[in-house]
Image: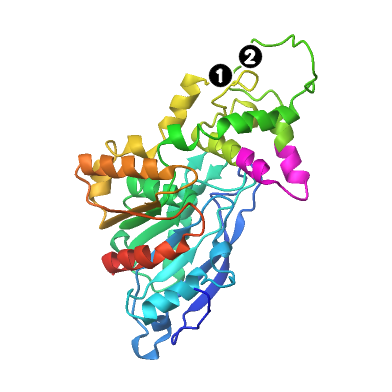
Amino acid sequence: MARKRPSAACGQLVTLQHESRVLKDNPLGDPYVREVSIYLPPQYADARRVNRRFPVLFDLVGYTGSGQSHTNWKNFEENVPEKLDRLIDSGRMPPAIVVFPDCFTALGGNQYVNTSAMGRYADYLTRELIRYVDAEFRTFAERNHRGCFGKSSGGYGAMIHGMKYPEYWGAIANHSGDAYFDFVYKAEWPAVLTALQRFAEPALKPGARRRSAGQARPGFDDGRVRRFLDYCWSTAKLSGSDITVLMMVCMAATYDPDPRAPNGFRLPYDLETGALIDRRWQAWLKHDPVHLVAKYRKNLKSLRGIYVDCGWRDQYHIHFGSRQLAAALNKHGVAHRYEEFNDTHSGIDYRMDISLPYLAKRLS
């Protein structure tokens, strides 16, 4: 969209502060008072229908994002409120309220689950924000009129919430959500382990190497992860490789938390030799959506809509996971819509032109 054109009818964006009890005293010391933005469609302000209620959608953004990243002004592109204005004004989408939560963390993001290493973000959404929004605005305050959607980590979050929390959500949309961890994450770890060597003590030196047998306690941080985190939290600018390392640390805190371990989580590789620790990797796979369909098929079948898509040039190879996820849904008789498109993982918010009307129609 090279030219930004305002819609004939514009909704209203309201930003409120919410104090969370669930996030208070979270392990990372992240803020528990958070801004939450809410998009109200043009029809919300219609004085002739002051009692009208609307379905509500929650936007779960990807890693390194927050709700504000989808409401900020964008050059040559629509932000999500502008997109909603256009879709609703054109009649492609029924009017809906859309919520933009802030679930950013000191580890760079969130998978929207409860974890002792980061905080109870699934509970934050389901037990607090849903009630808060329903109390403040004219929503249809029941699951059959409430859905969530997201891309990447947000797509993963939407899929997991559809599986585990169907009492709160009636439909979900998953854009390029993390799946098939053996492809998506394993490919990142060699570079991550190499980058973490920079923070090893004693520092690496050329010549004969005395230590080659691996860590004394495989799966536990020997200090280099903690030093890396201290570096991230004190430096003025993070590189692309820094973000990749931080993302894998965030995933470890999500999928294998352990309050007894340094930093509150285990690691799936020996930091010294790079050997995979199978028991730790199995802990990650227990969170892989590809492996969870069978367990949660009844919950998934209760949803009014499941939308999944992915670009077949996704640089993180998530299209293979999306295909396996769709195959698992088919195998277990879970109705859904799966699409692929000719693009990568990046810059694909235009796919919301399909998912948002899909959700709003099924939840209206």
Closer to the chain start, of discs 2 and 1, is: 2
Relative to 208, residue 261 above or below: below
> Is residue 240 magenta-colored?
yes
Helix, strand or loop under label 1: loop
Quadrant location of the C terminus in the rendered image: bottom left
Q: Residues within 10 Å of mark 1 (few under 14, many from 20)?
A: few
Give the x, y percent position of residue 133: 45, 66
Residue wearing tag 2:
214
Is residue 117 visible to the viewer in this orientation of the structure? no
Q: Residues within 10 Å of mark 2 (few under 14, many from 20)?
A: few
> Is residue 116 magenta-colored?
no
Amino acid bearing label 1: Ala
Residue drawn at x 39%, y 74% as measured from the top left: 138
Residue drawn at x 39%, y 58% as measured from the top left: 148
Amino acid bearing label 2: Gly
Q: Nearer the viewer, residue 154 or 351?
A: 351
Residue wearing tag 1:
275
Residue drawn at x 56%, y 24% as measured from the top left: 269
Extent of the magenta region: 229-246
Give the x, y percent position of residue 88: 37, 77
Relative to 3, residue 293 above or below: above
Distance of mark 2 from mark 1, alpha carbons?
A: 8 Å
In the figure, residue 327 lies in which quadrant? top left
- Which residue is most to the left? 333
Give the x, y percent position of residue 230: 74, 38
Give the x, y percent position of residue 268: 54, 26
Q: Is 145 left, or right, of 80 in this rendering? A: left
Helix, strand or loop under label 2: loop
Q: Which mark is residue 197?
A: none
Magenta stretch secondary structure, dominant: helix
